[in-house]
Amino acid sequence: MSDKKVTIKDVAKASEVSIATVSQILNGNSKNFSPKTVARVLKVKEELNYVPDYFARRMVMKKSKTIGVMVPDIANPFFSTLVRGIEDVLYQENFITMLCNANEDNKKENIVLEELSRRGVDGFIIASSAINNEDIERLLVKKKHPFIILDQKSPEENSDTIRTDDFLGGQLAAQHLKELGHEKVAVVLPENATANISKRLEGFRTVYQSNVTIIDALLTKEGGRKAASELVKTDVTGIFAINDEIAFGLYLGFRQLNKNIPTDYSIIGYDNVDMCEYVTPPLTTIAQPIYELGQQTAELLLDRIENPKKERVIKKLPVNIINRFSTTHA
Ligand code: RIB
């Protein structure tokens, strides 16, 4: 058997049609051809075991059917669920997802964005905050790359964006603790919080005003575990963990300090990742529609790719409280 790679020319010759016809049919534009021609081309493609060369195809079609996705921390279940939502929609539409875990590293994000652009991806989804708006302008806007911004990244002036209601989420968390009679409360969040996370604190403050103890922690379980030893030095009884990962870390931290949840501390988290139901006690939290957020983001981007001139889209998805067992009366 010859090792020579089968080309589109071979398929065209064996099907007795032009290369352009084969190209159109294999790219799903078969409506201009008779069913007989379409069937013959597809049969020959199978028989010759023809695999389209995506780089060549990109040169011709100016489309790679690939989307670049940037997230800050793929180990965080919020982002893995988000990417699942994105990927499920893209896959259905025959797009491939190229994932970059930015790790809050601006240099890495820059390099990856440049590289993805060079590889001809059709669009970008950016959920991490490392890249600044000037770089977005230079790397995406000027090059007319379609992109969507969400979550930790603040919207660029002209970009489509999809958000969840962080302000309301913070308010709901505070109202819940207030209703349970907690007067001394803390919010656990990163010192340099991104805009979406700061909004949660803003919402929280509409209920508790300045009467809030702020405890600094990274958005990780380890961040939460460390925060527990700071919290035991205070007189708070109600705690708003700005994401579920921090809440899970608090569980371990408090256990190591022989404190009980919810009798010593009521904890409310944020995100509603799967794990909330599996910890003891199950975590009361503010739910973001994470998977749907991913799906709608991908849909929005595909729509922008199809309709580059349409008006800027700004979408906001709702959040709600999920009452479980990690909070109780003060
Ligand atoms: O858990 C990750 C958190 O960071 C989520 O709340 C998400 O919205 C974010 O920005």
Image (cartoon, rainbow, N blue to C red):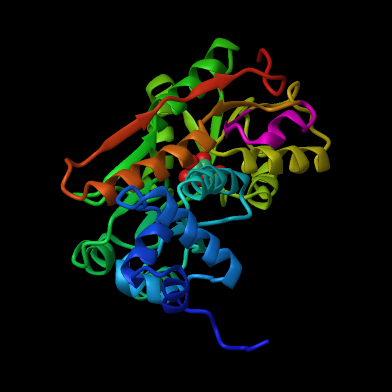
Which quarter of the picture shows residue 171?
top left
Q: Which residues are magenta?
A: 268-281
Which quarter of the picture shows residue 146?
bottom left
Q: How many labels were placed on the picture?
A: 0
- Is residue 97 covered in magenta? no
Place of residue 141 in the rendered image (x, y in percent of width and height, measured from the top left)? 21, 61
Q: Residue at x 46, y 68 (%)?
A: 105
Residue nearest the observer in this picture, 105 or 171: 105
Judge from the rendering whether residue 36 lies leftward or rightward of residue 255; answer left or right.
Answer: left
- Asked if residue 244 is positioned above or below residue 190 in the image, the reply reads above
Place of residue 326 in the rendered image (x, y in percent of width and height, measured from the top left)? 70, 24
Residue nearest the observer in this picture, 324 or 289: 289
Residue nearest the observer in this picture, 267 or 94: 94
The quarter of the picture where the N terminus appears is: bottom right
- Is residue 278 covered in magenta? yes
Q: Residue at x 63, y 54 (%)?
A: 75
Q: Residue at x 19, y 49 (%)?
A: 158
Place of residue 143 in the rendered image (x, y in percent of width and height, measured from the top left)? 22, 67
Residue nearest the observer in this picture, 241 or 305: 305
Q: Residue at x 46, y 62 (%)?
A: 41
Place of residue 40 in the rendered image (x, y in percent of width and height, measured from the top left)? 48, 59
Q: Is residue 111 visible?
A: no
Judge from the rendering whether residue 189 lies leftward or rightward of residue 313; answer left or right.
Answer: right
Which quarter of the picture shows residue 43?
bottom right
The quarter of the picture where the C terminus appears is: top right
Q: Is residue 200 visible?
A: yes
